[in-house]
Structure formats: C-alpha cells, structure tokens
Image (cartoon, rainbow, N blue to C red):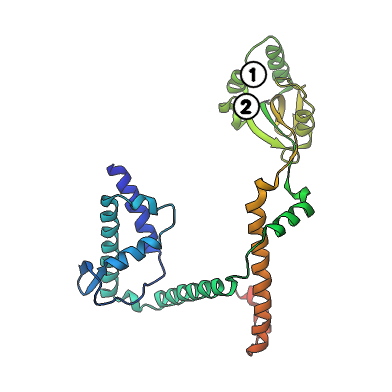
C-alpha cells in the first residue's frame, strides 16, 4: 500500500507542478481545508483540482487516504511556490516569459473550444460515406510470423539446416547459434508485413506456405538466414465498426481545420498585419 501511495504522490506532484491554470477567485463562504501562511486551500478549490486531473488518475482518489495524500500534495505545491516567491523567482524575466506563454496557451485553448463548439460534430452518415469511399485505406495487409537463425558463414548455416532436418528444435538452435538480437527469443521476429524487411528475406519468408516450413538458406547483408514460418494472417478488410471512432476523429479534425482556416482568413482581413520577412534573410549564417 505504501508503494502505491508513493507512486500516486509522485504522479500527482508532476501534474500539479506542471499545471498552468489558476482557479476562479475564492468566495468568503468556502470552507478552508488548509492554510499556508496567508494562502488558503478551500474545499471547493480542492474539488476543482481533482476535476483538472487526467481521467486515469481520478479513480485513484476515491479512497479517503488518497484524498489526504492529494491534499498534502497541494500543500507541498504551495510551500514550494511560497519559497520561490520569497527568493524573487516570480519576478525573474525568464519566469515571466514562460508564464506569459502558458497564459497564451490557456487562452488559445479556450478560444478554440468555443470556436469549434457545435460545429465539429460528425454524423453517422458522414462516417459511413467516408468508409465506403475509402475502403482501401482500411485494409489489413497479409502478415506472417517467423523465426530466424542468422549465422556468419554458409557452412554454419548448412550444418544448422541439417540438424533442423534431423528434428532438433529450431528455437533452441537459434538461442545457441544465431547472431541476431532475436536469438534470446528463440529467433522469434514476431509478425512482419511486406516492405518491412529486406527483399531477399521477404521473398523467402513469404514464399513459405505451411506452418513449420523451413526456408532454404538466404544470404543478406546481415549473414546467412534460415527462416521458419510460425503463423500467417491473410489480408482482410477492417469493418466499419472497427474503424468508426478512427473515422469520426479524422473527420472532426478535418472540420476543425476548415473552421480554423476560414476564421483566420476573416481575421487577416479584420486586423492589420505587417510581416517583414526580409529580416529573416541571413539569420542562419549568424549562428
């Protein structure tokens, strides 16, 4: 339990320290959970801080002890901020620049949320139409799983091939003799698709038909290979149900891009903009 609390505390500290947003002003009627010099943490602020956490962390704060740990993290954050302020770090030029960048990012995020609200929804008909018009983009290609033994000379490869033919275990021979990094996994390369390996290796591997079939010796720039087919998955079409969320996100992003580009076009006409690109000439040579 202590180990879990330590990890939770570390994760909470990370997110709290990197938070850019400051909550709304405190009401005098709010209940005070903690006081750090003249700074207070209220119950409402505590709840807001939890709401701002990533979704995967929130379930970890159901238990009372976890909430207490979270409150201690908030107090620690305020202690660090208080000490930093006492040292004048909140007035340093670089710190103020970073605060300004963070402020701009928060404002921009809020503005874009408002700009897209109600305009980027994707209807089921749009998803279905996109799928029918782009089915080729949602195909899973043929792939195979193979084991591989790689040695430096043809003589070594021929000897190992002979031992395989006599019934010795392929994976064990790979662990003992292969010079490939996959040797510790018994030569298991996992699943591969066409285009992911060298042409010579691909040609030999994909020509294997039966599970357990072993290839002839294949020479590549890495050495001499012996390949065994472990599994084959034929190419197939992904269904609409499989890709619905993927398509929805793709179409939503497309809509957002179009909305943003149209709005920026209006803003460029609305506001005066002067750009002096000539000042960029020669910048690369100054470094």
Pick whichever, 44 or 184, lies toward us: 44
Residue 77, picture quadrant: bottom left
Q: How many marks?
A: 2
What SS does tag 2 mark?
Answer: loop
Q: Is residue 154 left or right of residue 38?
A: right
Pick whichever, 29 or 35, lies toward us: 29
Q: Is residue 156 left or right of residue 103?
A: right
What SS does tag 1 mark?
Answer: helix
Mark 2–mark 1 contact, CB under 8 Å?
A: yes
Where 234 sits versus 34, above or below? above
Residue 262 location (% of width, % of height): 68, 77
The label number, if any, that marks residue 187 in the structure image: 2
Mark 2: give few (<14), some (14-19) or many (20+) Cα within 10 Å. Answer: many
Residue 133 location (% of width, % of height): 79, 54
- What residue did someone put label 1 on? 170
Residue at 65 percent of width and 79 percent of height: 264
Pick whichever, 250 or 242, lies toward us: 242
């Amino acid at each position: 339990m202590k180990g879990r609390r330590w990890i939770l505390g570390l994760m909470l500290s990370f997110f709290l320290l990197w938070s850019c947003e400051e909550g709304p002003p405190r009401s005098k009627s709010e209940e005070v959970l903690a006081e750090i010099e003249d700074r207070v943490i209220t119950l409402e602020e505590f709840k807001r801080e939890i709401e701002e956490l990533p979704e995967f962390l929130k379930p970890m704060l159901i238990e009372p002890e976890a909430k207490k740990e979270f409150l201690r993290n908030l107090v620690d954050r305020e202690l660090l901020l208080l000490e930093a302020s006492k040292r004048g770090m909140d007035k340093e030029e670089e710190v103020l620049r970073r605060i300004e960048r963070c402020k701009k990012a928060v404002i921009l995020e809020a503005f874009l949320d408002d700009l897209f609200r109600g305009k980027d929804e994707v209807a089921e008909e749009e998803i279905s139409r996109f799928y029918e018009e782009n089915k080729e983009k949602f195909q899973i290609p043929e792939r195979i799983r193979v084991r591989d033994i790689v040695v430096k000379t043809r003589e070594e490869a021929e000897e190992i091939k002979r031992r395989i033919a006599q019934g010795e275990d392929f994976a064990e021979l790979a662990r003992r003799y292969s010079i490939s990094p996959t040797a510790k996994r018994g030569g298991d390369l996992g699943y591969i698709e066409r285009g992911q390996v060298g042409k010579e290796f691909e040609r030999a591997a994909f020509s294997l038909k039966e599970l357990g079939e072993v290839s002839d010796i294949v020479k590549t720039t890495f050495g001499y290979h012996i390949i065994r087919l472990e599994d084959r998955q034929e190419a197939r079409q992904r269904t609409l149900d499989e890709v619905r969320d993927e398509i929805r996100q793709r179409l939503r992003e497309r809509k957002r891009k179009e909305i943003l580009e149209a709005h920026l076009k209006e803003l460029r006409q609305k506001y005066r903009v002067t750009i002096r690109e000539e000042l960029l000439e020669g910048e690369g040579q100054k470094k």
